[in-house]
């Protein structure tokens, strides 16, 4: 019984030790890039479902649309925290303009947050035509920021 316990204890200690080493190898900047990429992935997940409802690919469901619009509004606030100094290089699609034109980046990000919040608010009313118009505005906001600050595959 003691032998079995010691084996589990040894395994646990080694596992924790290796996990700590693996995490210690990632820098703060690498974590920041990973955080913002993950944030954008989650944002895209919910945005995509809204997009499919607006385009008629998925049937419109007011409760689901409202829920996902609220999630998009919340998630739109997260990625900006991952744009710290030193993250302009590495595994990133971010253009250097994020750091050379920070006022424009902030303006675009503020628009994303504001238009997402408006969509979430309008989703509560359930008027699908008004929702579609606001979604179109949000979509244009996303495109503007992508054009300004996201590297394309050809770049």
Image (spheres, helix red, strand yellow):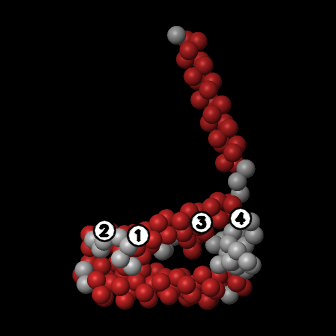
Query: Which residue in the protein does label 4 denote?
Result: 91
Point out which mark residue 64 bears.
2
Q: Residues under labels 3 and 2: Cα distance?
A: 25 Å
CB contact under 8 Å: marks 4 and 3: yes
Look at the picture and state if 5 lies above or below 38. above
* Distance (Cα) linking label 4 and label 2: 34 Å
Residue at which label 3 appears: 37
**Tag 3, which secondary structure?**
helix
Q: Are marks 1 and 2 in contact (CB under 8 Å)?
A: yes
User: Is 106 placed left or right of 111 in the picture?
Assistant: right
Q: Which of disc 3 and disc 4 is earlier in sequence?
A: 3
**Residue 145, located in which quarter of the rendered image?**
bottom right
Cβ–Cβ below 8 Å for labels 4 and 2? no
Q: CA distance from mark 4 to mark 3?
A: 10 Å
Q: In the image, what residue occupies the spot 69% across and 60% down?
A: 30
The picture places residue 5, in percent across and down from the top left corner, at 55, 17
Looking at marks 4 and 2 on the same chain, the residue that comes earlier in the sequence is marked by 2
Structural crowding at the residue carrying mark 4, measured as other residues with C-alpha within 10 Å and reported as few (<14), some (14–19) or many (≥20): few
Upstream in sequence: badge 1 or badge 4: 1
């Amino acid at each position: 019984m003691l032998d079995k316990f010691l084996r589990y204890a040894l395994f646990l200690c080694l596992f924790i030790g290796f996990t700590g080493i693996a995490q210690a190898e990632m820098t703060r900047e690498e974590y920041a890039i990973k955080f913002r990429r993950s944030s954008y992935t989650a944002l895209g997940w919910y945005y995509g479902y809204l997009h499919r409802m607006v385009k008629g690919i998925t049937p419109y469901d007011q409760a689901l649309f409202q829920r996902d619009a609220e999630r998009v509004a919340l998630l739109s606030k997260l990625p900006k925290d991952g744009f710290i100094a030193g993250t302009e290089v590495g595994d990133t699609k971010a253009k250097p303009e994020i750091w050379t034109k920070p006022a424009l980046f902030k303006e675009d990000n503020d628009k994303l947050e504001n238009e997402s919040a408006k969509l979430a608010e309008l989703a509560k009313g359930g008027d699908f035509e008004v929702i579609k118009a606001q979604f179109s505005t949000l979509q244009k906001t996303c495109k503007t920021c992508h054009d300004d600050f996201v590297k394309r595959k050809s770049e």
